[in-house]
Image: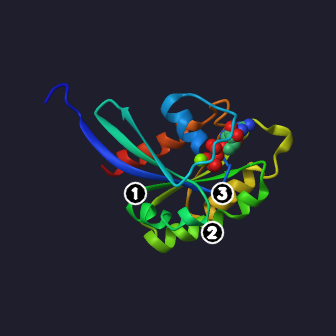
Amino acid sequence: MAGVSTLLKYKLTVLGDESVGKTSIIIRFTYDKFDSTYQPTIGIDFLSKTVHLEDFAVRLQLWDTGGKERFRNLIPSYIADSSYIVIVYDVTNRKSYLNISTWIEDVRTKRGNDAVIVLVGNKTDLVDKRQVSIEEGDNQARKFGCMFVETSAKDGFNVRHVFFRIISNVRQYK
Ligand code: GDP
Ligand code: MG
């Protein structure tokens, strides 16, 4: 029917260590804003964003995870329910990069190779503080069979690209 396009809905969960920029990436993508004051995410937050394309639209339900142990127990059920997973590390925090494998294991345990994972190295604007090279990020992504993007939620660099990688994957299989 003319003027009516198919709406595809997908769940996406964002994982990664505290303070790497998970919430900031989601806020940048949905509202095109950035806040430099840190407000830790308590439990699990939810935002939705619809992207309209020529012949169809995609509604992404974005699940933003956070908090300490008490809430980490909740994360596996969100992983189980998501077609897409974004795992974020901070390019100025080597520990957050080393922890990627733990997050990937959590996903693979729940989903096998079923879920599509995008690995994101965030905070590229902090050039002088970088502790992880783009090659290291790329190698890790190849090793685990993920897509890979470096971003800055602060200046907006590549943030849309993360979600468009996912949407082009949707297009491929729709
Ligand atoms: P989360 O705990 O993973 O959700 O991290 P937040 O999104 O809350 O971000 C943690 C802190 O890092 C906040 O103070 C943000 O303003 C800051 N931050 C997030 N992304 C970036 C970025 O791309 N560049 C810079 N310079 N700071 C960022
Ligand atoms: Mg957060």
3 or 2: mark nearer the eye: 3
- Residue at 64% x, 42% y is 39
Is residue 150 visible in the rendered structure shown here?
no
Crowdedness near tag 3: few (<14), some (14–19) or many (≥20) residues, C-alpha within 10 Å = many
Q: Earlier in the sequence, mark 3 or mark 2?
A: 3
The alpha-carbon separation of the residues under discs 2 and 1 comes to: 19 Å
Say what amino acid the circle numbered 1 marks.
Ser
Where residue 111 sits: x, y (%)? 44, 69
Residue 66 in which image quadrant = bottom right
Q: Secondary structure at mark 1?
A: loop
The CB of the residue at mark 1 lies under 8 Å from ligand 1: no
The tag on residue 25 is: none
Using the image as rendered, state which of residue 21 and residue 73 is in the foreground: 73
Say what amino acid the circle numbered 3 marks.
Asp
Is disc 2 in contact with disc 1, using a CB cutoff of under 8 Å? no
Using the image as rendered, state which of residue 146 and residue 109 is in the foreground: 109
Residue located beneath label 1 in the image: 83
- Residue at 42% x, 43% y is 167
The alpha-carbon separation of the residues under discs 3 and 2 comes to: 10 Å
Q: In the picture provided, is 123 more to the left or to the right than 14?
A: right
User: Which residue lies most toward the right here?
Assistant: 128
The CB of the residue at mark 3 lies under 8 Å from ligand 1: yes
Residue located beneath label 3 in the image: 17
Is disc 3 in contact with disc 2, using a CB cutoff of under 8 Å? no
3 or 1: mark nearer the eye: 3
Say what amino acid the circle numbered 2 marks.
Thr
Residue located beneath label 2 in the image: 102
Where residue 23 sits: x, y (%)? 58, 43
Where residue 1 sits: x, y (%)? 13, 30
- Residue at 67% x, 29% y is 155
Is residue 159 visible in the rendered structure shown here?
yes
The alpha-carbon separation of the residues under discs 3 and 1 comes to: 21 Å
